[in-house]
Image (cartoon, grey):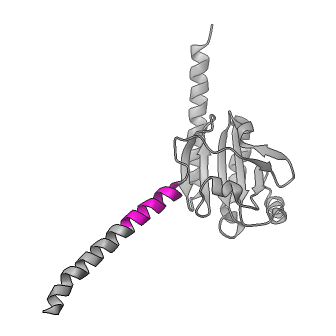
Amino acid sequence: MKKFSSIPRLKLLILIWAWGSLLFSSGCEQQHQGVKIGEVAPQFSGKDIYGKAISLGDLKGKIVVIYFWANTCCGNNLKHLEPFYDNNRDKGLAILAINERDSGKEVESYAKNNGVTFTMLSDDNSAIFKRYHGLGFPTIFILDRNGIIREKILGSIQVPKLEKLIQRQLQAQKEAEASYEKLHRH
């Protein structure tokens, strides 16, 4: 008889555990969602690997790719963005590759060894990564020319697919500028 009376208690305990787990996990999920598509990107400033002052606010008017990375997982893909950047920097593209794990000297060495010319920062104290609620590498944000987050990519992405997402923002900017010109012709 005790076996049968313990079954409802077991079900009740499982139900309480499941309910508590659901509440806990949904709270964590909300906490770790961080910045969202459609929001203004959190502002930050710092120095690039060569000591030049960098501020996200100074890049308003450009399509900005914020690429959080670590050499151990993302270095091979990151360097492949260089030709795309080189072809599009005059069209208003800025790439900020923010390394959270490696020293500034290691990031500088990576840039030199791979011919990377876009802006690279070393986030030694993880302040920028934390501001964006980063969970892993790579974490990539694509901002429109007004600093609004238009794409958020968590984890690995093939370079051609990333380039298509960036190109979409460059095209939207070009169309907006053409529309503005058309409306304001005298």
32 falls in the magenta region: yes
Residue found at x 74% / y 61%: 125
Residue found at x 36% / y 68%: 20
Near-viewer residue (182 or 53): 53
Q: Quadrant of residue 103?
A: bottom right
Near-viewer residue (64 or 54): 54
Residue 93 lies, in percent from the top left, at 69, 41
Task: Quadrant for the C terminus, please.
Answer: top right
Task: Quadrant for the N terminus, please.
Answer: bottom left
* Image-based side of 127 in relation to 172, left or right: right
Residue found at x 74% / y 58%: 123
Q: Residue furthest right?
A: 51
Q: How many marks?
A: 0
Vertical comparison of 82 with 145: above or below: below
Residue 102 lies, in percent from the top left, at 76, 66
* Image-based side of 116 in relation to 33, left or right: right
Near-viewer residue (102 or 160): 102
13 falls in the magenta region: no
Vertical comparison of 62 with 126: above or below: above
The secondary structure that most of the magenta stretch takes on is: helix
Looking at the rendering, the stretch of residues picked out in magenta corresponds to 22-33
* Image-based side of 122 in relation to 183, left or right: right
Residue 147 lies, in percent from the top left, at 63, 38
Q: Residue furthest top?
A: 186
Q: Quadrant of residue 12?
A: bottom left
Residue 183 lies, in percent from the top left, at 57, 15
